[in-house]
Amino acid sequence: MSFVYLWQNREKTHALSCFWLKQWGKRILSFTQLITVLKSKFFLKIRGSKIGDLSIISNKSRIEGSLHQLTIGDCTFIGQAYLAIHADIRIGSFVVINDGVKLLTASHDVDDPSWSPFAKPIIIDDYAWIATDAIILPGVHIGQGAIVGAGAVVTKNIPEYNIAVGNPAKLLDKQRVQQLKYNPVQLIACYEAWLGKD
């Protein structure tokens, strides 16, 4: 459970020092947010999702479909997104998915006279960043460290550390730095109060 992890890995300082008082003040003030985060994650897990340590899924996200097909790694942040789970959605660790993002695993075959539905998995590897209002379509694989720009519509795989923007999304000539070592959820107030900023 995440609270046990936070307690065991909490930033420790001298009791009753100025910093200690400030630290515990932050923990108390952000406690309601922490409970909301843990509750959202708990309800997804009891309905079959696999979610790693410290990952945060906004309680305002809309998640529909087969929750047992949703897997999320450690320390991943998902804002107010929409996930339509008709096939597997596998999201790695240290991923950021901003507000308004849509992950769509199903559609209809426009070449079929009977307009048959189909479903394909979406895979998002570690350290990927999916910016605000992007749409990821069925069968897409976002590589490690890749960036999908705000409002992009992704119909094809994005190779690792590449940056894709536009509708339909196209790769930029520039690539992202490859030595990534940040933890996006450590910046969230209810976790930062326990773990510190490092």
Image (cartoon, rainbow, N blue to C red):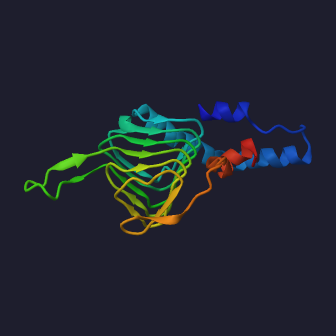
Which residue is most to the left? 113
Q: Residue 59 in the image: x percent, y percent?
A: 49, 49
Tell me if residue 198 comes above or below residue 42 in the rendering. below
Tell me if residue 3 comes above or below residue 20 in the rendering. above
Residue at (34, 58) in percent of width and height: 155
Which residue is most to the front? 173
Task: Name the quarter where the N terminus is drawn.
Answer: top right
Residue at (90, 38) in percent of width and height: 14
Q: Residue 124 in the image: x percent, y percent?
A: 46, 47
Residue at (31, 51) in percent of width and height: 138
Which residue is most to the bottom? 166
- For residue 85, side relative to residue 37 (left or right): left
Q: How many marks?
A: 0
Q: In which quadrant of the rendered view does residue 31 lie? A: top right
- For residue 20, side relative to residue 93 (left or right): right
- For residue 103, side relative to residue 185 (left or right): left
Q: Residue 21 in the image: x percent, y percent?
A: 85, 46
Tell me if residue 41 comes above or below residue 158 in the rendering. above
Q: Residue 107 in the image: x percent, y percent?
A: 24, 53
